[in-house]
Image (spheres, rainbow, N blue to C red):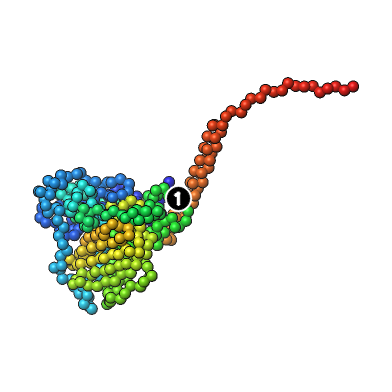
Amino acid sequence: MRKMALFAAAACLAAGIAATASAQPAAAPQGAAPPAGAAPAAAAPRAGGPGNRNALPPQDEAALRVKHPELFVLAPVSHSYKPARTAWGDPDLRGMWPTDSYGGLFLERPKNMGDRVWLTDEEFKVVDARMQASREAPAKETKSGKLGMGNWVEMTGAGRRTSLLVDPKDGRLPPLTPEGERLNKLGRSSWMDVRGQPFDWVTDFDSWDRCISRGFPASMLPFHYNNGLQIMQTPGYVIVNLEMIHDTRIIPLDGRPTHPGITDWMGQSRGHWEGTTLVVETDHIREGAAPINYATNGAPFGNTIPMSPKAHVTERFTPTGPNTIDYQMTYSDPAIWTAPFTVRADLTRNEKYKFYEYACHEGDEQVRNYIVTSRIRRAKEKAAAGQKAAEAASAAAPAAAVVPAAPAVSAPKHS
C-alpha cells in the first residue's frame, strides 16, 4: 500500500484513528455563548473519510426544539467591545491566534441535527471526555518514552457548536454544480489514495502534497498540527502569518486596485475597517489547491474540490474581548458551488504559542516513492493480467487432433 506524502500521512492517520485529535477547554466558546441552559457545543461527524469516531447518539430533535429552543439560536456578533488602538489609530488585532483552539470542531453538522446550533449537556459530556483524553495524550506519551500521535496532533479544542458552518442554516456544504462535480472527479491527490488513481508525475499530486501551499481559504481553517496564526500590523497593512507551509498574507488597507492577470496561492487581498471590524476581500486565487482541505475535520473526502477564477472570499475579524476575535469567512464560487457558504469561529489569543520551522519540501520524498511504487504495481498488474489471459486462451483452445503414426516402410534393396 502506498504511503501518504510525509505530512499527509500524519494528518490522515490522525483523522482515521480518532477524534482524539479533538480537545476543548470549556472556557473557549465558539461564536456567541449559548443562552442559559444551553449546552456547550462539540464536534460533528466527519462528512467524508474513513469512519466516524465522533458520532453521538441521536436525539429527539422535535422535542429538543420545544424544550430547549435556545439550542437552535446563534447570537449575532457582538460589537460592544472596544479594543485597544495601535499608535496610528487602527483597532489592535496583533498577537498569536492559533486555530487549534477549535480544531476539533467539525466543518459540517450531522444531518440529523438539522439547524441545531448547540449540543445538549449529555452530548457535551461525551465529547468533553474524549477531548480530555486528547489533552492528556502528549504527557502520557512523553512519560512512557513513546512517540505517537499524542505529541503530533495539536488541536486543543472543538468549540461550543455543532459545526463551523453557520450558513446554510443546516450547517452543511451546498452541492457542487455539474461542472464542479466533473472537475472534482478529475482531481488528483495522494490523500487517502483518491479513487485508486495512478501516479506518474508531480502533476498527479495537489499543492499541499508537494509542499507548495495549503492554499486559500483552506489555510485559514484548522488542521491537526501547525495551526499557528499570527496577526501583525503596520500603518496601512495587516499581515496574517501562517505556520503551515510558512505562508504569509499581506493585506493593504489603502484601497488600491487588484492586479488583473496575477494570481497567488493566498489570492490578492484588500482590507478596510468597518468600525472595529477588519473586512478583507480576496480574489485572484491561484487554482490547484482545494479551498477546503480533507484534513479539516468534517471536510469532504479526498483533497480534490476544484476552484475557478470566480472564487471570492469575504472575511470579517471582529474583536469581541481582549483575547477573542470573532472570525467569519464567506466563500463564493458560482462556477463550482450552487451557493455561497459561511464559517464562523472564535480565534483565541495564546501568546505562549510558538512557530517552528515547517521544513516540508526538504524531506518530502514520498512524491517520488508514490510514482515509483505506482509504476511497479501497474507493471505487475499488467504482467499478471497478461499471464492470466494467456492461461485462459490456452485452456479454451481445442485439443490437438491425434494423428496415428504411419507404418514403417523399409527402403528398397538394390543389387
Q: In which image quadrant can residue 246 be found? A: bottom left
Badge 1: how crowded within 10 Å, few (<14), some, or many (20+)? some
Query: Image height check: is 193 above or below 244?
Result: above
Instruction: Report the residue that reaches farthest toward the right.
Output: 415
Q: How many marks?
A: 1
Q: Residue at x 83, y 22 (%)?
A: 412
Query: Image height check: is 374 above or below 80?
Result: above
* Relative image position of residue 243 (x, y in whole percent): 33, 63
* Residue 129 seen in the current view: no
* Relative image position of residue 274 (x, y in whole percent): 20, 71
- Residue denoted by label 1: 198
* Relative image position of residue 165 (x, y in whole percent): 23, 56
Q: Residue at x 23, y 51 (%)?
A: 109
* Relative image position of residue 285 (x, y in whole percent): 35, 65
What's the residue type where badge 1 is placed? Answer: Pro
Instruction: Report the residue that reaches farthest toward the bottom.
Output: 88
Query: Image height check: is 214 above or below 196?
Result: below
Q: Residue at x 31, y 74 (%)?
A: 257
Left or right of 130: which side holds 407?
A: right
* Residue 63 seen in the current view: yes
- Quadrant assignment for the C terminus: top right
Q: In which image quadrant can residue 275 be found? A: bottom left
Q: In which image quadrant can residue 74 be found? A: bottom left
Left or right of 407: which side holds 5?
A: left
Look at the numbered disc 1 and give the secondary structure of its residue.
loop
Q: Residue at x 22, y 57 (%)?
A: 167
